[in-house]
Amino acid sequence: MEVTFFSVLALGFLLGIRHALEPDHVIAVSTIASQSKKLWHASLAGVFWGIGHTVTLFVVGLVVILMKNEISQQWAMSLEFLVGIMLVYLGVKTILSFNTIHFHKHEHDGENHAHLHSRQKSGAHGHNHRHTYTSHLGSMFVGLVHGLAGSGAMVLLTMGTVNSVVEAAIYILIFGAGTVIGMLFFTTIIGIPFVLSKKRRSVSRTFGLITGAISTVFGLYYMYNLGVNEGLFTLWI
């Protein structure tokens, strides 16, 4: 019995690593990693995402299991729809953060002139610390939303795998540890090109804009697929 349960936990850990690398997770965290100035900042973004994801899965999952209830299809799909909204928001926010070019107009000798300028982000030490702290909280929030959206599937997986609430709690935590490790590995890898290109603004900006565009387009497709192809809009009506 113990060997079987430990085997289940090992499988849960591996499934957690695999779960972290699902497209919507990868795209969302990539937009956050693209803002990192140091590699360990990108790595921590993955860790905080995994923590937020695990907290939601653990709390919602156990509550639903204890109540011996199931999340309805409409609610489960609606929570998934939030992921699409979040991806679009992260994408647009990333695009705007890298779109640092603006026009400056002024009058000189009676004639109007327009110049292109590049806004320089503040490099103050205190500002960087606040930015890093905020981005990590943002990464945790993204993980919370993803965990909320995946709680229905997590409950079904857990209920079909373990025999008690205690085992369910342990399984979810081990699964969560796997997602933390998986996302830590991914954000470290994806953070390398962003960090290395920081001194070359044009390259860094291109990477950031591509990342933001992918997140925006994927988020719109995600919502369309849920709402139209899978019938969520019909369920709402």
Image (tube, rainbow, N blue to C red):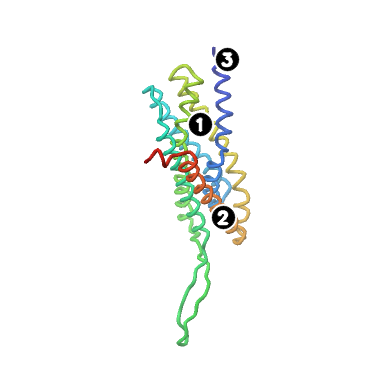
Q: CA distance from mark 2 to mark 1?
A: 28 Å
Q: Which mark is residue 186?
A: none
Mark 2 or 1 closer to N-term? Answer: 1
- Residue at the (48%, 30%) spot, across then down: 153
Secondary structure under the numbered disc 3 in the rendered image: helix
- Residue at the (44%, 49%) spot, across then down: 134
Q: Which residue has dot 2 on it?
A: 208
* 3 shown above or below 145: above
Frontmost residue, 103 versus 46: 103
**Dot 1 surroundings within 10 Å: few (below 14), some, or many (20 or more)?**
many
**Dot 3 surroundings within 10 Å: few (below 14), some, or many (20 or more)?**
few
In the image, 181: left or right of 134?
right
**Dot 2 surroundings within 10 Å: few (below 14), some, or many (20 or more)?**
many
Q: CA distance from mark 3 to mark 1?
A: 21 Å
Mark 3 or 2 closer to N-term? Answer: 3
- Which image quarter: residue 141? top left
Q: Position of residue 145 (x, y in %)?
A: 44, 40
- Residue at the (50%, 47%) spot, across then down: 219
Mark 3 or 1 closer to N-term? Answer: 3
- What amino acid is labelled 1 in the image? Gly
- What amino acid is labelled 3 in the image? Val
Q: Position of residue 164 (x, y in %)?
A: 45, 17
Secondary structure under the numbered disc 2 in the rendered image: helix
Q: Which residue has dot 1 on it?
A: 176
Q: Position of residue 151 (x, y in %)?
A: 45, 32
Q: Which residue has dot 3 on it?
A: 3
